[in-house]
Image (cartoon, rainbow, N blue to C red):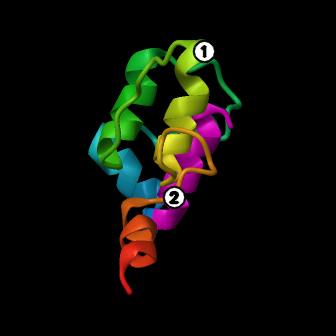
Amino acid sequence: MTIFQQLQQRRNAQGKTLQYLATLTGMSVPQVSNVLGGKVDARLGTVEALANAMGASVVVIPKHLLPEVERLLSGKAIGPDDVPSSVDRFLASTP
């Protein structure tokens, strides 16, 4: 998922309008729309301003760590899928 898709998804989840983001960032509504739509080659500062207006941060992640970060962000524990959680182990040990 691109940074623009992530920002658009966050905007939709928060129910923030283009006008609201434009007001917060000092951009025009068409500019916000074009940046979020990935239609323009936006400067990093512009992307950071939009992310900041939605309570998010832009982070650079080394590619080799991306699977672990995606896993963490999805709410899954980091590690093998077949390892039982602490709760599962506790419930299995109770008579």
Q: Compared with residue 22, is residue 11 higher up or lower down, i.e. above or below? A: below
Residue plotted at (71% across, 31% down): 39
Q: Find residue 84 and name its label.
A: 2
Q: Which of the pair 51/69 is nearer the observer?
A: 69
Is 11 magenta? The answer is yes
For label 1, the residue is 63
Residue plotted at (46% across, 75% down): 92
Whole-percent x, y for residue 64 in the image: 60, 14
Is 7 magenta? The answer is yes
Q: Does dot 1 land on a helix, a strand or a loop?
A: helix
Q: Find residue 23 and name its label.
A: none
Whole-percent x, y for residue 85 in the image: 45, 59
Residue plotted at (53% across, 20% down): 65
Residue plotted at (38% across, 87% down): 95
Range of magenta residues: 1-13
* Residue lying at the far bottom of the rendered structure: 95
Magenta highlight: main SS = helix
Name which residue type carries label 1: Lys
Name which residue type carries label 2: Pro
Of mark 2 and mark 1, the one earlier in the sequence is 1
Q: Does dot 2 land on a helix, a strand or a loop?
A: loop
- Residue 29 visible in the current orientation: no
Q: Which of the pair 43/63 is nearer the observer?
A: 63
Decide if residue 83 is on the left or right side of residue 22: right
Q: Which of the pair 83/28 is nearer the observer?
A: 83
